[in-house]
Image: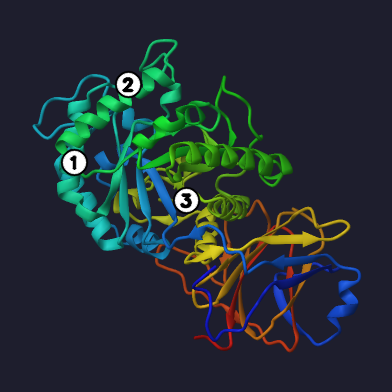
Amino acid sequence: MAGFTGGRPTVAALTVILAVSCTWVWARSTSSGGSPAAQLLTTPTLTLDTQRPGSVFSRGAVGFSTEAGELARRRLSGERPSLVRLMRMLGPSVLRIGGNSVDRSWWTSKGEPAPAWATATITPRDLAILHGLIRATGWRVLLGVNLGHFEPARAADEARVAQQRLGSGLLGVELGNEPDYYAPQYRPAGYNVAAYLRDAEAYAGALKAQAPDIAILGPASTQTSSLLSQLGGAGQMFSELTQHFYASSTCPGKPPVVAPSVSGLFSAAERQLEERVLAMLAVAAAAAGRPTRIGETNDTACMASAAISPVFASALWALDWTLRASSSGVSGVSFHGNLGGVCGANPESPICAAGPDAALRGELSPQPEYSGLLAASRLEGGRFVPTSITASTPPANLTSWATLAHDGTLRVALENLATVGAPQAVLIPMFGYTATEEPLEAPSPTARQDVLLAGARVTGRGWRSKPKRIRHRRTLRVEIPAASALILTLRPLHRS
């Protein structure tokens, strides 16, 4: 690609040689001066094609999604230091506010009493408090408005006030939440894409009348429906197409997906499910001529599963899914949870309070999944480059992703998704690069504590990473144990 030129070393392809070790060790690196050629005869080879950079992985692509009820509870405040710190470590990114509660929320700028169906009342004061959070973090907000209860004028008034209070911190407004499941609660049986488009167009007209320059996003659909794919060219009414994705589900009466278990989360079936959703998004994006965004995602839909949501396996899945989705071209990935709630009641939330007292004080802690998001964010700021493994039997549980920054820096994520077994050794001819490594590791896939990224725990008070400089001669050797990951940063010795 034009622009990736200058005085740095020319790299047509960076070759990574994979070998199997026979001992269990935590991720570590060693220098190798042996003959790579001999090992090439018997080991798989991973090639990073730096001459064909693809989708941009923008800074701030990894973000959060939370319930509209959190806005009404005034938990989204810049006066909560741990929330500000945890957002800053990921950001500046996007905070999407929506979820099921958005269609049960009531907006008023005039102080009217809320109707009986409302579970949350949102006012201009709530948006002013939210502004304090985005000013403290540098994040932007994707604000959901109630589409379930059809009131275009009220939604437009909320958008107008949000535009005034949030300014450039407002990414846009999203219409409702999962309208493909509106019937029979919010719409009559038979509610279809044509009826949805009539509703969405009525909202778009009202919003544009009161907030002319506002970006409108939608449809915020579920992965199991065909709503997004049926929009076709009508999707161009949105600035971005938004889609939800959950790796597993405990939802009753809905199409089955992968079971909520560590083996399910790491399975080939899960990867295939993800690829199908991303392929559908690509088709919808092409038909509408609009970018796409994963506006809400996590490991389990409906009731979070204690088997995977609060454990280290969720971090490894989140790292892989974020990079897989972003490499396909989506503009952002927002992980959902009640950001101010208690962890026990919200095990899927990337950050939460350890207990009721901590929740009252606004003291939040990162769950294991947060470390996976932080690891993924280390690759931001570049373009994905194609990777390919050539071998008679490629390692089935190894995933690899890489980005190339404008200055020639390569950032690589290697994940070993085997739950047991020997480490996967990787040999990397460096071609004039320095290297540092940041392992993502824990005692086991089901560990809830002692999760380390770059040798340090991530807490609500911050993260003091300890990236390790890797000394090498001709070839770098690293080992990735089962159920762990490794982030490598490769910097050219000579940069323009």
Q: Amino acid at mark 2?
A: Arg
Q: Residue 193, how many percent across, how many down?
A: 43, 21
Neighbour class for label 1 at 10 Å: few (<14), some, many (≥20)?
Answer: few
Does residue 313 appear anywhere in the picture?
yes
Q: Which numbered disc, 3 or 1, marks the residue that appears first in the sequence? A: 1
Q: Residue 420, how many percent across, how many down?
A: 78, 55
Left or right, residue 54 beside residue 333: right
The numbered mark at residue 350 is: 3
Question: Where does label 2 land, which residue?
Answer: 198
Question: Where does label 1 land, which residue?
Answer: 212
Q: Are marks 3 and 1 in contact (CB under 8 Å)?
A: no
The relative height of residue 119 versus residue 277 in the rendered view (above or below) is above
The relative height of residue 177 versus residue 11 in the rendered view (above or below) is above
Does residue 122 appear anywhere in the picture?
no
Q: Are marks 1 and 2 in contact (CB under 8 Å)?
A: no
Q: In the orientation shown, which residue stands out farthest toward the left?
A: 110
Residue at disc 2, secondary structure: helix
